[in-house]
Image (cartoon, grey):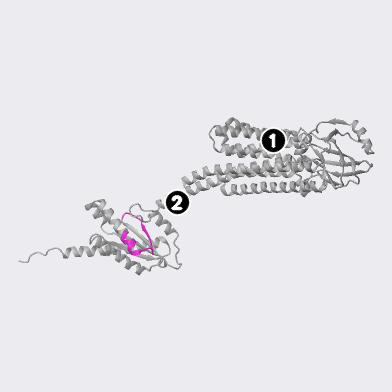
Amino acid sequence: MLTEVLLVQGWSIQTLMSAFRCLLTLCVTFLLAYMPLADAAGLSTSSQQIYFAEDQQVLPHRYSDVPHWLNKLSKVDRVDLTGGSYWLVKKLSISEPSQWIASVDGPIIENIDYYLYSEGNQIRHLSSGYSHPYEYLFSYARHIDTPTLGGYWLITRISSQYYSEQPQLSFGQKAKMTHIYHWRASIITLCLGGLFILALYNGAVSLVQQDRIFGYFSAYLFAVTLSLALVFHVGAHLFHFTVLSVQMLPVLGIPIFSVLFYCRFLNLPNYAPRLWQASRLLVVVSLVAIPAAAIWVNYAVVLIYSVVLIWVALAFSCGIQCWRQGAKQALLFILSTLMLLIPAILLAMSTVPKNSSTLLAADVSVLLSCLLSTLFMSLTLHYKFRRLTLESLLVNEQLNLERDAARLDALTGLQNRYAFNEYVNNIEFETEPFTCLSLIDIDYLKSVNDQAGHQEGDKLIKLVAEALNLVLSDKVQLFRIGGDEFAVFTSKLSSDELRDKLAIADKVIQLNGSAQSGISFGCSTTDECDDAEQLFYRADMAMYQQKAQRKRKIKLIAVSEQPQPHQG
């Protein structure tokens, strides 16, 4: 069993590395195939322009007024993560009749207003946003008709208490964009479902195994799943939960449960005490950041992203330090944490305007990276669970061997007095089939020990045990309960049948030993007794009566064999 445990440990590392490479390849392949598709769906005739939007600002009345109107606006390079109102502007040229979709891609944007100006001075207005009904799952996209061909201005006003990333205005053909959004929604749903199933699985393992590591990892997975579900509009879309002040707060639960997990998984207090203290401090910071982010909503994203980046850096440092100190499991943790560097880098770049080619793949990349990381660590814990199971089986097997050894008599191999007491405690009285007990005593064992030595006495004890086993076969429970005492329990033989077989055993012992080296025995049955004490007493008394009769018989034989005095 121990060899099997070691083999499983070595095999699990190889398997995990193969799984890691396969999952990473699938992720990269998807992104390489997905980003060109997203780029091909939109019009690339112009880049996005961002302007600061003031309150009560009047929109242009005609298509020709838009350039003059834009000159009066304050142009900015990016939106402020602390919130505000902005204009996103694109100039379009439509050369073929088709149906179109306009969308602002960004996880959380409170209100969106689309205005489409045509050269014929026709204006289309549509509203969207986090608290508005959704036409496409997990997206702010809206279908817009273009009545004529030619030039268009797409002016979009966005306003939100905070921005979780730089929003990107996109406009493309409905058929292609719909296809992308359906793929995107399917991937998001499958990834969130996979994370939720992993969380349930590890939670169940924690309950069965009574191991806190699995419990903390399950809580970490639930925090990741809830955070991503809220960021990807699941709460708003399915449950109409649109309280913006708490949408990002579950993200702060991720570092808390992650620290609880990796401190135990890496045995951090022993390998890296200083990093353990820093990790505990991070938990305190995360707990303090939760009410702070709820109160100062505009600064929630900045605060949360700062905590997340510190957490990823600290977790990676802990893995490296523990690995250098000789913790083999730290290598797997490092590989898992590396997957989190992708969303961490994207978060660090959240103040940089995104390129349109990575527009629709950036948020999905975050989701896939989180899934890949948690799945890899789940595989690691799965093999840990398997190893613990094998170790548990090994311990149980050893305990069973010791338990059996504690119930066996070393000299005869029969069950001993401890096993006899256990069996007696389980006897049922006044219930058929009735149980018969026979107590057996070796005659003159003390004399054999005194005259021939204990080795000859041990040979006699073994002879008695072999004779009883031979005659009684498997129809009885046979015990050695003392130096020269044996006990037999049976529910398959009556007391008369048992006496007959014991008489045969007595003859076998005398033939293979000496005429005096026999056995005395007495029987009693449960239908004659009320409890175990009475059962034992009756059998004991019957045995001593037979022993007394045997001694008298041997004494009479000895007297009769003495020479008679000569009569003069």
Mark count: 2
* Residue that numbered label 1 is attached to: 344
Q: From the viewer's perspective, is 401 left or right of 183?
A: left
Cα–Cα gap, marks 2 and 1: 51 Å
Position of residue 83 measured from the top left corner of the image (x, y, whole percent): 81, 35
Quadrant location, the C terminus: bottom left
Q: Which mark is residue 450?
A: none
Q: Observer-nearest residue: 77 or 171?
A: 171
> Which of the 4 quarters of the picture holds residue 109?
top right
Is residue 232 rendered magenta in the image? no
The amino acid type of the residue labelled 1 equals: Ala
> Which of the 4 quarters of the picture holds residue 545?
bottom left
Position of residue 457 measured from the top left corner of the image (x, y, whole percent): 27, 54
Q: Which residues are magenta?
A: 466-483
> Which of the 4 quarters of the picture holds residue 116?
top right
* Residue that numbered label 2 is attached to: 400
> What residue is drawn where x is 85% and y is 35%?
86
Vertical side of 306 occupied by 425: above or below: below
Crowd around label 2: few <14 · some 14–19 · many ≥20 (10 Å): few
Please tell me whether mark 2 sits on a helix, a strand or a loop: helix
Asked whether residue 223 is in view, the answer is: no
Position of residue 47 measured from the top left corner of the image (x, y, whole percent): 82, 35
Among the two numbered marks 2 and 1 on one chain, the one whose residue lies closer to the N terminus: 1
Please tell me whether mark 1 sits on a helix, a strand or a loop: helix
Vertical side of 279 occupied by 508: above or below: below
Q: From the viewer's perspective, is 272 left or right of 454?
A: right
> What residue is drawn where x is 35% and y is 69%?
497
